[in-house]
Amino acid sequence: MQTVFSASDFFDARSERMVFDVRSPGEYAQGHIPGAISFPLFSDEERAVVGTAYKQESRELALELGLEFVGPKMAGFVRQAKKLAPDRRIAVHCWRGGQRSGSMAWLLRQADFDVVTLEGGYKAYRQWVLEAFEKNIFRLFVLGGGTGSGKTKVLWALQDQGEQIIDLERIANHKGSAFGFIGEMPQPTVEQFENNFHDALYQLDPSRQIWVENESRSIGRVSVPAGFWQQMKNAPLFNIEIPEPVRIQNLVDDYVGSDRADLETAFLKIDKKLGGQHLKAALQALQEEDFPTAAAIALRYYDKTYQHGLETSSSPDIRHLTFDHGDPAQIATILVGRI
């Protein structure tokens, strides 16, 4: 039976095996395969000691130190593995597919687990992920519209109607603008964003179209991979326009209830482009809890920015759709009909 899997086979094995990432907790936190469980052979401190011994002394000394660290933990590893994977089907990986994953696989096989390992380790998986963004061709449709147009709601309405979507803002834990961090969980690392993004794409049918919201390449502190970003820029762009009062209400619905200090911080981020007078008016509106006025002031800045983006867009096919309402389901229906 095959016991060493390629990155793609190992990734697919997640559906039928528990994936154990035996790298250190710090390595796992930086980035990991979606769904993998941190099952570290060494703590961060132990890994540092072993690594230093390997580089400065010898492989033999590093091995001896590693055995000293791991020996007392072996029974605990087996007990923990039984709890996490009662069917005893496990996939194990480390950084390069070497000593750490090999040692854990050996131990668990001795305890009658069915274990496979990742050829080339997490490093090979990362290469596979990054190549997917550069080499794979996706049939993209980009959904655009000014701030407050409810694009994300339309995106999910498209999914409700059977379309495939990628919600970059949800994957990034950020709405993309200066206000994008408000109400969101902490953003993933750039590495983890790429892993999660790849995972979401991998679950879709590449032969069918995929809708994605029009975004800047940077979404908070993470960035859309260059290959996918280029395809977004060259894809058909559906630009929706809805009445300004509806847009203002959308923004109020999205942000009222947020910490007012966060809203003030966001306005301060765009103070130079907004202008001192408008900034003062916006902050005053927030103090008075006049959120519609604050939202309208924000739109003055974002509409100019978005219009500039439209005028400089490299999309060969921009389709403008104007609505007298903001109903996401109805807008989604019209979009599907315009493909």
Image (cartoon, helix red, strand yellow):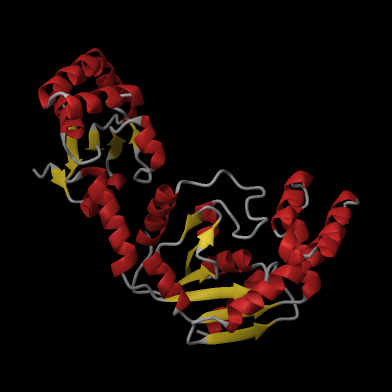
Question: Seen from this angle, which residue lies furthest right?
Answer: 288
Q: Quadrant of the N terminus?
A: top left
Labels in figure, total: 0
22 and 51: which one is in front? 51
Q: Residue at x 28, y 32 (%)?
A: 22
Q: Residue at x 70, y 69 (%)?
A: 302
Q: Is residue 12 above or below residue 275?
A: above
Question: Seen from this angle, which residue lies furthest top?
Answer: 72
Return the x and y of residue 25 as percentages of the image width and height.
37, 31
Drawn side of residue 37 relative to residue 90, left or right: right
Whether residue 42 can be seen here: yes
Q: Residue at x 20, y 14 (%)?
A: 68
Return the x and y of residue 18 as percentages of the image width and height.
30, 38
Q: Is residue 195 above or below residue 104?
A: below
Drawn side of residue 155 relative to residue 256, left or right: left
- The image quarter containing residue 210 is bottom left
183 and 278: which one is in front? 278
Q: Residue at x 16, y 28 (%)?
A: 103
Return the x and y of residue 28 as percentages of the image width and height.
36, 37
Drawn side of residue 325 relative to residue 235, left or right: right
Question: Seen from this angle, which residue lies furthest front?
Answer: 56
Q: Is residue 226 above or below residue 316?
A: above
273 and 132: which one is in front? 273
Drawn side of residue 185 relative to residue 56, left or right: right
251 and 58: which one is in front? 58
Whether residue 167 can be seen here: no
Return the x and y of residue 48 as percentages of the image width and height.
30, 26
- The image quarter containing residue 198 is bottom left
